[in-house]
Image (tube, grey):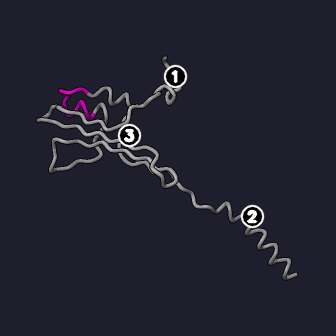
Amino acid sequence: MHTRNILFSLFLLATLLPACAPYKMDIRQGNFVTPEMRSQLKVGMTRAQVKYAVGTPMISDPFHANRWDYVYRLEHDRKLVEQQSMTLYFEGDNLVRIEDRNPPLENVSAKTDEPAKE
């Protein structure tokens, strides 16, 4: 009888153990800036207009008040899946330069469920 309880316990443990695998969640950090949001940015815009178009910057550095950094990272299963980086430079209240270090999307329509244009 005692052996049967041990075998049943081992069987139960073996069937339930895979369900206890650790969950690895997606980790999103920063500002996700879509291509549509980027296309709204124009040199000469005010800080308020930029905030309206792309949101508040992720990094605010008091030593570089005329520079706004927008950084985004997506990790899945502890592997980097996507990374974006964009820096905006201001003189006074006006946007004077945009450094967009994001690779161009080859087929944006595939992500938006629109038919691809050829």
- Residue 94 percent coordinates (x, y): 15, 31
* Residue highlighted by disc 3: 32
**In the figure, residue 104 lies in which quadrant?**
top left
Distance in Å between CA atoms under marks 3 and 1: 21 Å
Can you say which quadrant of the picture contains the N terminus? bottom right
The residue type indicated by label 3 comes to: Phe
Image-based side of 112 in relation to 8, left or right: left
23 falls in the magenta region: no
* Circle on res. 91: none
Q: Residue at x 44, y 47 (%)?
A: 74
| Residue that lies at the very extreme toward the bottom in this rendered image | 2
Q: Residue at x 29, y 36 (%)?
A: 100
**In the figure, residue 87 lies in which quadrant?**
top left
Tell me the element at label 1: loop
| Residue that lies at the very extreme toward the top in this rendered image | 118
The residue type indicated by label 2 comes to: Thr
The residue type indicated by label 1 comes to: Glu
Tell me the element at label 2: helix
- Residue 27 percent coordinates (x, y): 45, 51
Q: Are marks 1 and 2 in contact (CB under 8 Å)?
A: no
Q: Nearer the viewer, mark 1 or mark 2?
A: 1
Give the vertical position of 85 relative to 34 (above or below).
Answer: below
Distance in Å between CA atoms under marks 1 and 2: 45 Å
Going from N to C along the chain, the mark reached first, 2 or 3, is 2
Magenta residues span 42-51
* Residue highlighted by disc 1: 114
Q: Residue at x 51, y 28 (%)?
A: 110
Give the vertical position of 9 relative to 44 (above or below).
Answer: below
* Residue highlighted by disc 2: 15
